[in-house]
Amino acid sequence: MVLIEVFKTSVIEPEHAAVIISTIRQVQSCYHVNFDLDDCDHIMRVKTNHNIIDTKLLLQILHGLGFEACILPDHTYLNNSNLSRHKQLL
């Protein structure tokens, strides 16, 4: 199972995103991080195959580097009468 966490950030420069990605990889090498800076929320996505994403740690890293960030709420949808979570893929 792949877990995904999505954050709204204040990151707007690709250079800043690269520093954040590098910092996160140094601390949690099992996280795959990418940014969508063209999105109005300047999205940061974090994926892992492990059982948990340490959102508190990620927020601390971003805040420590001088950026604002918050977790975007889960997107849930109804699929065949079963409530599914968007964050849990395969």
Image (cartoon, rainbow, N blue to C red):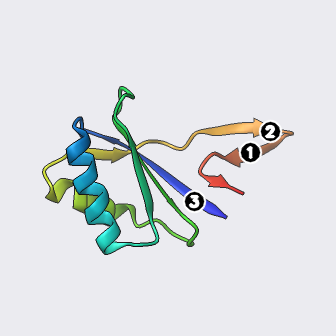
Q: Which mark is residue 45?
A: none
Can you see residue 68?
no
Say which label, 3 or 2, has the lower sequence index.
3
Figure quadrant of residue 57: bottom left
Residue at 28 percent across and 46 percent down: it is: 69
Q: Which residue is mark 1?
A: 83
Q: Position of residue 15 (x, y in %)?
A: 21, 45
Q: Position of residue 31 (x, y in %)?
A: 44, 65
Q: Which circle, 3 or 2, is nearer the viewer?
A: 3
Three-letter code for the amino acid on which mark 1 is drawn? Leu
Instruction: Characterize the local packing of mark 3: few (<14), some (14-19) or many (20 or more) Cα atoms within 10 angstroms.
Output: some
Residue at disc 1, secondary structure: strand
Residue at disc 2, secondary structure: strand
Q: Which residue is mark 2?
A: 79
Residue at 57 percent across and 59 percent down: it is: 3
Residue at 58 percent across and 39 percent down: it is: 75
Q: Between marks 3 and 1, how big is the CA–CA gap?
A: 17 Å
Q: Position of residue 7 (x, y in %)?
A: 39, 45
Instruction: Characterize the local packing of mark 2: few (<14), some (14-19) or many (20 or more) Cα atoms within 10 angstroms.
Output: few
